[in-house]
Amino acid sequence: MRIPRPRSTLRASTLAAAVLLVGTALAGCGSGGPGGSDDGSLDVWVYQDASTKVQREVVKRFNKTSDIKVKLTQVPGEGYSDKMRTSMGTPNAPDIFFNWGGGSISDFVKKDMLLDLDPAMAKDPELKKAFIPTILDAGAIDGKHYGIPMRGMQPVILFYNKDVFADAGARPPKSWDDLLKLIDTFKGKGVTPFALAGTDAWTELMWVEYLMDRYGGAGVFQKIQSQSMAAWDDPAVLKTARTVRDLVGRGAFGKNYKSVNYTADGASTLFAKGKAAMHLMGSWEYANQKANQPAFAKSGLGWTTFPAVPGGSGDPKNVVGNPTNYWSVNAKVKGDKQKAAIEFVKFAAKQDYSKDLIANGDVPTTSDATSLLAEHENPGYARFQYDLVKRAPDFTLSWDQALPAKYTPPLHTAVQKLFNGQLSPAGFIDALKGM
């Protein structure tokens, strides 16, 4: 399951800490369950990381305006998703909770556990208009909105090392032919063309997601998502798998990528130290580099878009990644508490909230954030991200979040085997169809 950025920070949180904190939090929820906690407050769960301070501030602002107060539970570690799933449908379930949209909440929707927020948007049209449409819709299930964007955008970006490019007299790729030529250029310089954390399959999945989008368009995955695993039998999937094998064969990722990690900063360090020229990674890579290689983040880190591929029918303006994270409301919350819950999630659409995100180094998902981006610590990077996403006709949610959780392990295994040469392109399709 994908987690928000920065991954290296979040992975360091231990499961034991998650179990301890969640156990403490649940014990304090009382026996009233959703909408019925002992003191009449709203229980809100959020994944604890560097951005949690934004949610702490909005809780303070909301509680000054509402008779029904919010109590924020900050849950660290990768245990968040498991604990959230375990609690839903029990008296210990949160009233409002952080999630990734897509497959992370699809089972809850099927069991009518979440509040459909479309009626609230119909009553308040400005709420729907407040967010970039592709991001708001990325959190929808079967066309209905069960989430309100509450964190910064997280597109996957092609980063490059400015110093390595300057030494090679090279420019960022604008076409697939450019990209292939750069592989040879950097190999000739003794530099790995692309950093790749092959021990973490989700980093390889980013390549597969972008390539399939560029070959067949966003509709290919949408068909898979809405129909069945048999829909993997699309020509764009085969072209993608063949291109991955071609890239590996050309030495695009070097010889040791299978043993490189992301969670312990392996790939990012190789990239920052000039051992690799480029890195396809989520937008959290900037924050990761700022934390661990600040000088590189300040002056050596460049970014560009993923190029189109020859013969591809996908729009090269499309993006993939984690559109954002969302607030969802438990369907068991009723009456005045439901009204208060809706008012709370609506605070994510306000400018004060966007300003807090920007101050935290995030790029807001609101449609009117352009004028605020000058306050970002790196305005150029913020504007690039914001324009990239706002112009995108489609923003495909990471497959390991968009699909139900049961598909994540076999998906990761198939992708890793494709990169490692343990599956042929045809075998890769068979593996996906058999999930």
Image (cartoon, helix red, strand yellow):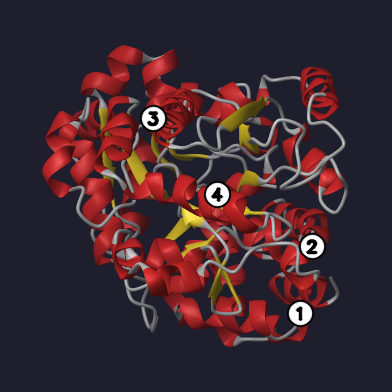
Labels 3 and 4: the sequence-earlier one: 3
Which residue occupies the foreground of this view, 108 or 308?
108
Labels 4 and 1: the sequence-earlier one: 1
- Three-letter amino acid code of the residue under disc 3: Arg
- Three-letter amino acid code of the residue under disc 1: Met
Q: CA distance from mark 4 to mark 1?
A: 37 Å
Q: Position of residue 166 (x, y in %)?
A: 18, 31
Where's the C terminus, which quadrant? bottom right
Which residue occupies the foreground of this view, 358 or 398?
358
Q: CA distance from mark 4 to mark 2?
A: 32 Å
Per the image, label 1 sits on a secondary structure element best described as: helix
Based on the displayed image, in which of its 4 quarters is residue 105 positioned? bottom right
Labels 1 and 2: the sequence-earlier one: 1
Residue 249 located left or right of residue 19: left
Residue that mark 1 sits on: 229
Alpha-carbon neighbours of circle 4 within 10 Å: few (<14), some, or many (≥20)? many
- Three-letter amino acid code of the residue under disc 2: Tyr
Residue that mark 3 sits on: 61
Q: Position of residue 202 (x, y in %)?
A: 64, 47
Residue that mark 4 sits on: 341
Residue that mark 2 sits on: 407
Q: Nearer the viewer, mark 4 or mark 1?
A: 4
Residue 344 located left or right of residue 296: right
Q: CA distance from mark 3 to mark 2?
A: 39 Å
Confirm or deny contact between disc 4 and disc 2 (CB under 8 A): no
Per the image, label 3 sits on a secondary structure element best described as: helix
Q: Position of residue 41 (x, y in %)?
A: 64, 35
Confirm or deny contact between disc 4 and disc 1 (CB under 8 A): no
Confirm or deny contact between disc 1 and disc 2 (CB under 8 A): yes
Residue 132 located left or right of residue 400: left
- Residue in view at x 35 percent, y 58 percent: 306
